[in-house]
Structure formats: structure tokens, C-alpha cells
Image (cartoon, helix red, strand yellow):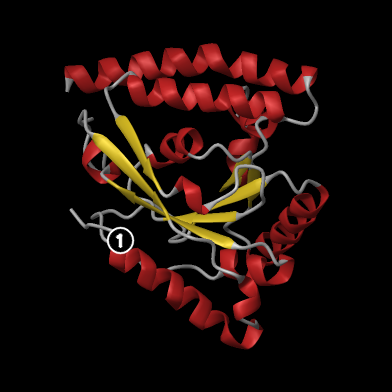
Amino acid sequence: MIHYFFMIGIVSLWTALAIPIVILAKVIDLSGNLAHKLGRYWSLGVLKIPGVNIEVEGLDNIDEKSQYIFISNHTSAFDIPAIYWGIKNKNGMLAKKQLKYVPFFGWAMWAAGHFFVDRKNHRKALAVMDQVAQQLSDDPSHSLVIFAEGTRSMDGQLQNFKKGAFILSLDTGIPIVPIVINGAYKAKSKKKRRIVATTIKLTVLPPMDPADYSSETRNDYVQDAKTLFDKHYIAP
């Protein structure tokens, strides 16, 4: 327990140091490219401080400069820095709208190019997805990361996938790239106040072409993606 709170303290200090730098980077470079690069190094620090290593398999399946909708499973708070460091594509993640108003931390997330969703209001969530689609259209170098289950799994098992990412892919024509995360639940589950120094592995699978589906077959799109995760994910 002492080790856990010590690690949390060091990570918090690292984050406090990184936040103003990321915000300043946005002021210097309005494109957000510099803020994103610095955010990736923040992620590396968050992983290295408690001794969590990252392995990435399948990077040759994607183009670093192309635009994708990355979807992933979600079992740990380490999933975010793992993807942010492991995937070089400029990307933003969906986050709760409330985080946007958290002083400094929320501002840094905005500076780094993340997207905010009101999960409590379905109509507003759909409107935000329209805004996300527009922003993706305005900046073809900017990709999106969505945790397909919507929230962290409490037991490490795969949950049902939400349809939002797939609807967005069909609406925009942007391919979905599955990223299967293994090992993050062991590193830090939601329930346990313990961080284990271990290795998190990201498996980047080939892009899924939305042209192979339609609004009528979007459930097949969701299920085909879920089947890929069932094949590659190793449950704890």
C-alpha cells in the first residue's frame, strides 16, 4: 500500500510538471502536433515510473500519417498511456465532458487534441459525435481512439461493444483499427490499490474497411470487431 501511494505521488508530480508544458505547446503550435508529441512523453513517464513496459505488435499494419478510428478494450488506467505512447499517429481520445472543465488537467487534454462527450445525455452525445466527425474531416492527420466497451471492465473480461465507433466509421468512411491490449489488467485493475511492474502488449490489427458494411449491417461490423478481440485477447 505504501508503494502504491508513493507511485501515485510520483506520477502526480510528473503530471503536474507536464501539464503547463503541454498547454504552452498548444499556444506555440496551434496545430497541436507539438502538444501531442509532448503528451506522448508524459505517457512514457507514467509507464516507466512504476516499471510498466510496452510491447507493440502489428505497427506495420497501419500508416503513421493516415487517419483511423482506433478501438480498444479497456481494463486499466494504464490503457490510455499505453496507446498514447505505443501508437505514433496523432490521436485524441474520447473523455467525459466533465474532465474538460478540470483546471489545468482538462485544459491540457484539450491542448493535446482530445474529444469530450456528454455520456449522460444521449442526444448531446450524438451531437458531439457529429462534432468529432467534423473535426476529423477538418484535420485528416488527426485520428481518434475509442474504448469500444465504453468503460473499464471490472473483472478483466471483454464486455459488449458499443456502436458509436462503428457508426462514426460508417458516417465518415474512416477505417477502424482494432488495438488489443493484454497485460494492463495485471498492471493495475480498477478495484485494486496495487501497481504491478509488468509488460503491456498492444496488438495492432489490420484496418477494417467501412465500405464492407452499411447502416443495415452495422451490427455485423460490431460483431466482426468483437470476434477479433475474442481471438487475440487473453483474459486474466
- Tell me where residue 95 sits by quadrant: top right
Nearest the viewer among 159 and 119 is: 159
Question: Which x, y percent locates residue 170?
Answer: 67, 72
Q: Residues within 10 Å of mark 1 (few under 14, many from 20)?
A: some
Q: How many discs appear?
A: 1
Question: Which x, y percent locates residue 191?
Answer: 24, 43
Q: Quadrant of the N terminus?
A: top left
Q: Is residue 57 left or right of residue 217?
A: left
Nearest the viewer among 52 and 63 is: 63
Nearest the viewer among 105 and 30 is: 30
Question: Which x, y percent locates residue 159?
Answer: 34, 65
Residue in view at x 78 percent, y 31 percent: 31
Residue named by callout 1? 232
Residue in view at x 72 percent, y 54 percent: 132
Seen in the picture, residue 200 relative to 127 is either above or below; the reply is: above
Q: Residue furthest front?
A: 60
> Is residue 131 visible to us here?
yes
Residue in view at x 26 percent, y 20 percent: 5
- Tell me where residue 197 sits by quadrant: top left
Residue in view at x 30 percent, y 61 percent: 232
Q: Is residue 27 left or right of residue 126?
A: right
Q: Is residue 140 left or right of residue 121?
A: right
The disc labelled 1 sits on which kind of residue? His
Nearest the viewer among 117 and 35 is: 35
Question: Which x, y percent locates residue 206?
Answer: 49, 60
Mark 1: which secondary structure? helix
Seen in the picture, residue 19 relative to 58 is either above or below; the reply is: above
> Is residue 160 visible to us here?
no
Seen in the picture, residue 45 relative to 121 is either above or below; the reply is: above
